[in-house]
């Protein structure tokens, strides 16, 4: 290996035993250094969520134009493209939360009994993530309830995308075009994508700017995350307090 490329967003660490120094009998010094690296993908997924959300909004405008006309093929294409961009925005937002959770979870002590209960009862992912974040930041009941509500909706749409049903089902009403569609076209539309993306990124923004993590490693990470989020939201975050979807 000729060397190691270090870029922004990477954490560099020396593992246990990774630095060795020795002096030979003739006084010659020798040494060896081993580095481990980690790239933080949480801001990357936030950026992807915002990019796909912009696409979903553009596709919504195209869909509104198409559905004002009479070309059935244009209607179908526009509806599908809005669905595709919206689903990708939702997925990216959910993965951003997962990436954040993966970084803080090792620094949070969850009682063994509670972890065992989660496994036994197959506790929902959003509930586990809520509890870890609550412990990491010492959230009060009101904040915990809001976090849990948002995460439940974020993970609900994520699961619909990750674990799609193969059943043939009755169509549901698309509230913006007032016609029955396959359920994906109603759930994964720009409006819902915007709610999910704003809710997920607001969680990160709020914790980075107003959170009080107990662990020093989490505090250090949040300072870095705060800087990255401010680059992605130069005018501040379009605050979201709930991701309760209208459909």
Image (cartoon, rainbow, N blue to C red):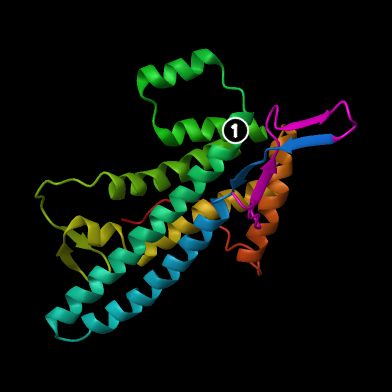
Q: Does 3 appear in magenta?
A: yes
Find numbered disc 1 in the image and state the secondary structure of the residue it sits on: helix
Q: Position of residue 52 (x, y in %)?
A: 42, 66
Identify the image quadrant of residue 101.
top right
Comparing 92 with 205, the one in front is: 92
Instruction: Name the residue: 60% across, 36% down.
Output: 104
**Residue nearest the observer in this picture, 207 or 11:** 11
Q: What span is colored magenta in the figure? A: 1-28
Horizontal relation, residue 224 to residue 183: left or right: right
Question: Residue 19's image quarter?
Answer: top right
User: Magenta region's main secondary structure?
Assistant: loop
Of all residues shown, which one is farthest toward the right? Answer: 27
Q: Is residue 112 above or below residue 150?
A: above
Residue 141 shows in this picture: no
Q: Which residue is mark 1?
A: 134
**Count of numbered circles on the image:** 1
Report the residue at 23% width, 84% height from top: 68
């Amino acid at each position: 290996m000729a060397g190691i490329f270090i870029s922004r967003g990477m954490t560099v660490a020396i593992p246990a035993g990774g630095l060795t120094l020795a002096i030979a009998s003739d006084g010659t010094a020798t040494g060896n250094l081993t580095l481990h690296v980690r790239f933080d993908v949480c801001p990357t997924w936030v950026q992807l969520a915002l990019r796909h959300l912009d696409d979903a909004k553009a596709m919504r405008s195209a869909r509104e134009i198409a559905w004002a006309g009479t070309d059935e093929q244009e209607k179908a294409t526009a509806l599908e493209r809005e669905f595709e961009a919206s689903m990708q925005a939702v997925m990216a937002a959910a993965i951003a939360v997962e990436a954040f959770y993966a970084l803080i979870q090792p620094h949070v002590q969850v009682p063994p009994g509670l972890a065992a209960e989660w496994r036994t009862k197959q506790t929902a992912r959003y509930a586990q993530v809520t509890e870890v974040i609550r412990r990491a930041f010492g959230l009060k009941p009101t904040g915990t309830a809001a976090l849990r509500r948002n995460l439940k909706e974020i993970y609900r749409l994520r699961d619909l995308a990750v674990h799609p049903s193969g059943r043939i089902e009755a169509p549901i009403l698309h509230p913006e075009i007032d016609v029955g569609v396959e359920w994906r076209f109603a759930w994964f539309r720009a409006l819902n994508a915007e709610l999910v993306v704003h809710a997920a990124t607001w969680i990160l923004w709020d914790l980075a700017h107003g959170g009080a993590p107990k662990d020093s490693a989490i505090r250090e990470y949040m300072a870095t995350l705060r800087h990255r989020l401010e680059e992605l939201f130069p005018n501040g975050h379009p605050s979201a307090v709930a991701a309760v979807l209208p459909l």
